[in-house]
Image: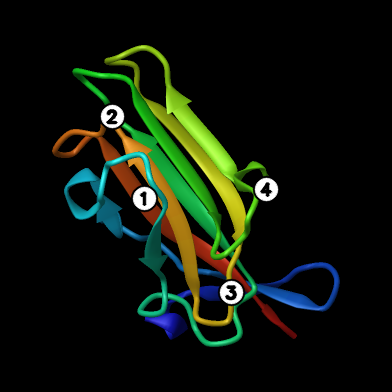
Amino acid sequence: MFASGTKASGGGGDITVNRGNVTDPDWQSVDLTKDDAYHDLDLSGIVPVGTTFVQIIIQFLGFDTTLYLSLKEKDYISAELGHHLSQRVAGTPYMAEVWLGVNADRVIEYKSKNALWLDLQITVAAWKVPA
C-alpha cells in the first residue's frame, strides 16, 4: 500500500507521499467508538514507519443529526492542539482536509459523537516522511 502513492518534495527536508486515488474511506462511523472520549486510530497499516504527519480527509454526511469529530496527535495532553470539526446543520454535507502529527507508532486519537451508521468517513490521503 505504501508504494501506491507518488512522491513530491515538501519543504524542510520532508517528502510528501500522495496515497493516490483512494476509492473507499479507511474508517466510517460504524468503525468508530462514539462516546465523546478519545480513542486510538491506528494508521500503521496505511502509512510507513518514519511518518511524521498525515493528511486526513473527513467527510460528514449526517443526514439525521449534527456530528462532531476531534483528531489529535496521540498522547497530547491538550486537545486544543488538534483539529475539531462539526457539522452544525443536519443534512448538510461537509468535507475537510487536515494535516496531523503522528507518533512513532503511527497512531492518532479521535473522539466522536452523534455519528450514525455511515454519517462520517475518514480517509488517509497523504503523509510526510523525512527525506
Q: Which residue is drawn at 16% across and 48% down?
A: 30
Check disc 1 and give the amino acid type. Ile
The kind of secondary structure element at disc 1 is strand
- Asked whether, in this view, residue 90 is left or right of residue 73, the answer is left
Colour mode of the rendering: rainbow
Q: Quadrant of the C terminus?
A: bottom right
Residue 114 drawn at (x, y percent): 27, 29
Check disc 3 and give the amino acid type. Asn
Height in image: 29 above or below 24? above
Q: Which of 11 and 79 is in front in this view?
A: 79
Which residue in the protein does label 3 denote?
A: 103
Q: Earlier in the sequence, mark 4 or mark 3?
A: 4
Height in image: 63 above or below 21? above
Which residue in the protein does label 1 denote?
A: 122
Q: Tell me the CA gap for discs 2 and 3.
A: 29 Å
Q: Tell me the CA gap for discs 4 and 2.
A: 25 Å
- Local packing at callout 2 (Cα closer than 10 Å; few below 14, some 14-19, many 20+) is many
Q: Quadrant of the N terminus?
A: bottom left
Check disc 4 and give the amino acid type. Leu
Label 4–label 1 contact, CB within 8 A: no
| Number of the label disc, if any, that sits on residue 61 | 2
- Local packing at callout 1 (Cα closer than 10 Å; few below 14, some 14-19, many 20+) is some
Please identify, in this view, whether the residue under mark 4 or under mark 1 is nearer the observer: 4
Q: Which of marks 4 and 1 is nearer the N terminus?
A: 4
Residue 94 drawn at (x, y percent): 41, 27
Which residue in the protein does label 4 denote?
A: 81
Check disc 2 and give the amino acid type. Leu
Q: Which of 32 and 125 is in front in this view?
A: 32
The kind of secondary structure element at disc 3 is loop
Q: Tell me the CA gap for discs 2 and 1.
A: 11 Å
Please identify, in this view, whether the residue under mark 4 or under mark 2 is nearer the observer: 4
Height in image: 12 above or below 41? below
